[in-house]
Image: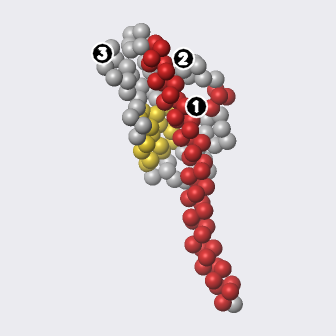
Amino acid sequence: MVTVLIVAILAAVAIPIIRGRISSAKWSEGKAMMGSVATALRVYAVQKGSAPNGNWPPTVAALRFQTSDLTGTYFTLTAANWSSASYPAGGNLTFTISVDAPVGINTPTNVTLDQAGAWVETP
């Protein structure tokens, strides 16, 4: 009886920890996708230049992505939003890539990445 009690206590402690690790592992796919989009935005800025030469914010096609390029198990390219990307003439490239958690991922509910490489997780 004591052994069953100890196993039950250990399971009660371990299950929430394991669930948190699973969500974190799933988010690694989303963050990798966001990093790829950030790199593509930087390359686009170098190739096309500032507005009005570049079309800001660039579309998925302008960044040379196919929809299937960044389709993973949990995240898709269509989940990413970079509508705030801008590169004004004489200014600096700025962008914020935002992704909401898909069904099945509890926390965080949203992650953003900016041009400085800063990640912000919204619980």
CA gap, disc 3 and disc 2: 22 Å
In terms of secondary structure, where does tag 2 sit? loop
Tell me, for residue 90, which label it has, or none. 3
- The quadrant the N terminus occupies is bottom right
Q: Residue at x 46, y 12 (%)?
A: 48
In terms of secondary structure, where does tag 1 sit? helix
Of the residues tagged 3 and 1, which is closer to the observer?
3
Rendering quarter of residue 56:
top left
Tell me, for residue 62, which label it has, or none. 2
In terms of secondary structure, where does tag 3 sit? loop
Q: Earlier in the sequence, mark 3 or mark 2?
A: 2
Tell me, for residue 92, which label it has, or none. none
Q: Is residue 11 left or right of residue 108?
A: right
What residue is disc 1 on?
78
Q: Residue at x 38, y 14 (%)?
A: 50
Q: Is residue 46 above or below residue 38?
A: above
Q: Is residue 113 left or right of residue 8?
A: left
